[in-house]
Amino acid sequence: MRRIKQIDVKRALALTGTFSFLCSCSQACLLPFLTLYFRQLGLSPSMTGIIMGTKHSITLVWSPAAGLLSKRYNKRRVVINCSLVFSAAAALLLLLLPPVGNPGTQSSTCNTSNLSSGSAKSLDDLTTSTTSQTLPTITHREFAVATSPSNSVSDSEPPPVPTKPNQNDTKNSEIQPSQVDASAVPSSSPTVLSVVHSTVSSLVSAERNKRSVNSSGFLASLKEMDIQNQLFFLMLIIVSVWEWTSAPLEWTVDDGLYEYLDYADASDRHSSTGVWGLLGGAFGVGGAGLVVGQLSCLIVAHTSRSAVHFYFYAGLAALALPVAIYLPLYLNKKRDRANGLLKAMQLVHSSPQALLCAFTILLVGVVNSAVENFLLWQMEDNGSTEVHMGLSLALALLSQAAFPLLAGRVSKLLSPGRVLVVGAASLGIQCFYYSFLWGPWMALPAQVLSTFSSGALWWAVGIQCEDVATPGAERSVRRVYSSLCLHLGRALGSFAGGFVVQRFGVTWLYRGVAVGLMAWCVCLPLLQWKAPRQRRINYSRLLAADASEASDSESEPERDWLDKAMEDDRGNNNYERRVGHLN
């Protein structure tokens, strides 16, 4: 007799909640601080915007594609494990890139310009530092002293020494091989002359060896750029690889768990795992900020304390790997997610109310990119440390997680359309407030508004999904909003926001997006009122409401005909099972 596999829903939810907590905690330890790390390395705001825009663009395209491929070839668990391992490894590669050494772009709380030797390393230094030691250099002053007779001070003028024509510090600048004049060296110092000649020759040889390394291809083109552009292109490559490895994780896990719970007729409990993700994110960002903020600027030689964010990310990803082995995943071959997503896009396109909601989420994504990319820059300019930043972002996530406690009262006061307007307006108020920060803790009060700007906003989107979707398509419609529209807005906002900050500053970026979003919130209620409503009947909600309103005192003839039909159908099914068992 064929054994039926026992399905433990509670165990599945516990494992998935633990995995969601660890993954969200891992990402929150690093991702909110990533653009701050770019700033400390010396990247400009436009470069930072391009990198983050590319990151969101990869997520937009690759997440659904990777989820579809992993399902088609039944490799979900392999994709999850590889994503955890390779994303951690790719993130650690960013620590190999040195800062450009521009003091004006370094952190005000921990000046990382002192971490280098005082000047920026070029790409040649990066490629040869692992195979050779740093050669000694000679300054003009040391050369003049070393070549003076008897190395003592005399009343006569010292021999003339050529100087570099256009340097900020000619007194201590390095001597060039072409600047050595044999006539300037007295004949009475043959030993010093030989030492100088040997040192200069070694410098010339080292310089030629450096320029012979990677003298063709892409690295050769990088060598022709300045150090900031070299760093930008290397950072763009590494972040792109990192996002290609990490993007499939959330989508693949979500698909596998939902199909597992749907197989057990418990798909309504799927949304409970999202709360654990918010709690994990709050714990990660708050804990990382507290720990890093207490460290000194240098934890070890030439390693800044910002590297701890990357170590936390990799360590928690490794900790989530054993949990991923036991994740409950189920493959439902009858469900075609590609067609489901396309059908969901058609449903959204056919409903004017859904289109208004989609455009609102697109604008929210644009504004969110401004907050995610440059809020920590604004806080740092006003004296905030990692402690202030981490606690502020943790409060925002906790406020978002607390909205379900208020959802019942809010639904009685406002319709879902009005809640959508209130949520978007709250985000605009937050951005406008961020443009007037004046102290380390001043960003903290605005984080409470995340209860509405994130929690209430996505609650209203969920109600909109139930109204527009056909039975079984609610989750796909929700993904049109949460994945496609949101990431598209984040990508566009990152690209544009970086150039706005480069030209006008962070303050005017926040004021601009706040005014634009508030203007849309003024127009949105009017457009919602004029747009025709095409609400579909959700039969599961209708049956649930009918069952809750039924009275126990009602007599049998007064009960609803649908309840009778369902009971008759269940009775017929039970009778057929008994007959089949007897036969």
Image (cartoon, rainbow, N blue to C red):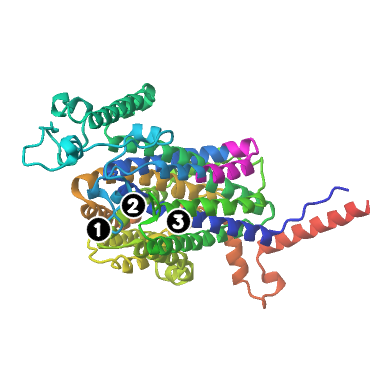
Judging depth in this view, the residue of 108 and 541 nearest the camera is 108
CA distance for labels 1 and 3? 21 Å
Residue at left offset 82%, top offset 58%: 574
In the orientation shown, which residue stands out farthest toward the right? Answer: 583
Disc 2 crowd rating (10 Å Cα; few below 14, some 14-19, many 20+) is: many
In the orientation shown, which residue stands out farthest toward the top? Answer: 216
In the orientation shown, which residue stands out farthest toward the bottom? Answer: 553
- Where residue 340 sits in the image (x, y, percent)? 55, 42
Q: Amino acid at mark 3?
A: Cys
- Where residue 289 sits in the image (x, y, percent)? 40, 61
CA distance for labels 2 and 3? 13 Å
Name the quadrant containing residue 560. bottom right
Q: Give the magenta-colored segment's residue range.
A: 69-88
- In the image, residue 256 above or below residue 58: below
Query: Label 1 belongs to which residue?
Result: 381
Secondary structure beneath label 3? helix
CA distance for labels 1 and 2? 11 Å
- 321 falls in the magenta region: no
Checking the image for residue 29, the label placed there is 3
Task: Report whether residue 416 is seen.
Answer: no
Which label's residue is closer to the chain start, 1 or 2? 2
Residue at left offset 67%, top offset 69%: 559
Query: Label 2 belongs to which residue?
Result: 36
